[in-house]
Image (tube, rainbow, N blue to C red):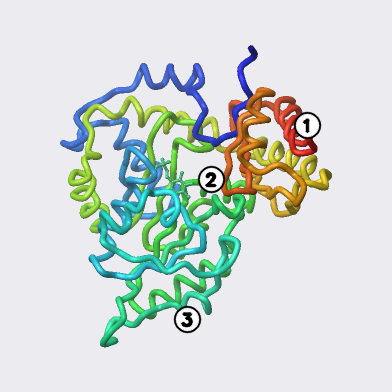
Amino acid sequence: MNTPIDLRSDTVTRPTPGMRAAMAAAVVGDDQFGEDPTVNELQARIAALVGKESALWLPSGTMANQVALRALTRPGDDVVVSRESHAVWHEKGGGGANAGVQFTEVGQGGRFTADEFVAAVKPRDHMLYPPTTLVEVENTHNRAGGIVFAQEDASRICAAARERRITSFLDGARLWNAAIASGRTLADLAAPFDVAAVALSKGLGAPAGSMLAGPRDVMSDCIRHRRMFGGAMRQVGILAAAGLYALDHHIERLADDHANAALIAKRLAACPRCALDAADVRTNIVIFTLAPGAPDAAAVVAGARAKGVLVVAFGPRTVRAVTHLDVTRDQCERAADVIVAVVSGP
Ligand SMILES: *Cc1c(COP(=O)(O)O)cnc(C)c1O
């Protein structure tokens, strides 16, 4: 059987030969002593790219988010996030377990406005309310189909937060995609926020690693929490080298992933049993719902798998496909045809 066309996530990529060579040649040291030159170089480059004072290596994006939550809030605090955010849906309850916070979801389709944020804020000095101390924006937004968060909204939300002494956090696991799709720099997108997270292991194609970037004192605090979470590592320059390689070789090419996702979306939109707006697909994520009469998501996932195409169910009648550097345009065309055939039935 041929290797399946794997569109389950942009995390399924394997390091390219060039990336593996960079990893093999990495100069390393003990990162807990701050002595891994490759990690230090990556942290300096990410801090500059994201436009913050300092940056910190973390083994995963979930740990980056958990460490940020722990460092930026206190147990019992309220955190305002977009509806269906990664923090609420994809971290196994980590925010409640590790930081002891509660989440208030606002907005629609991954977006929210400063007015919606302000309406959800619970003031610190209220007799009953849990104090809102953090606002989190996800860009691009995974469960909303990779949408790019409007920069004007981000600026207004963060300004309103600052007025209320509320910290702002950008979950930018796919901020690279937002940058390519919007023509803005990473630093521009992260500028309104106090602290930002970016992932090396999604579209950039590294085998592991996420980074936090922010003020030096916050990053120092995050070093402590990273250790408490068990995420402090040793000769991790082998992984950081993959990140550095990705910064040099895998950013501009994200435009190809976006074009491939648009192509899949266009083919699916032409199928009456798939509901999606192809114009909304501007990055590498395609989420569609199954119209009445179509099989459910589990049946579509199984049917596509039988024909060599891997996608995931995001709800009972919702399916997600993600493009990445390990799938070609030709494979994406074939995958779209397979999905349409499966959805259309025998
Ligand atoms: C993938 C993702 C994360 C978490 O990254 P992992 O490396 O899978 O732990 C965090 N936030 C968003 C928006 C993501 O898409």
Q: Amino acid at mark 3?
A: Ala
Percent from the top left, x then y, of residue 158?
Answer: 45, 70
Quadrant where the C terminus sits is top right
Mark 1 residue element:
helix
Q: Which quadrant does ligand 1 occupy?
A: top left
Residue at numbered disc 3: 119
User: Residue at 78% of width from left, 46% of height from top?
Assistant: 273
Q: Is residue 284 visible?
A: no
Which residue is farthest left?
33
User: Residue at 23% of width from left, 45% of height from top?
Assistant: 226
Q: Are marks 3 and 2 in contact (CB under 8 Å)?
A: no
User: Residue at 61% of width from left, 35% of height from top?
Assistant: 311
Percent from the top left, x then y, of residue 146?
Answer: 60, 50
Residue at numbered disc 2: 176
Residue at numbered disc 1: 337
Distance from the alpha carbon under mark 3 to that under mark 2: 30 Å
Task: Classify residue 329 as left or right of residue 109.
Answer: right
Where residue 229 sits, quadrant-wise, is top left
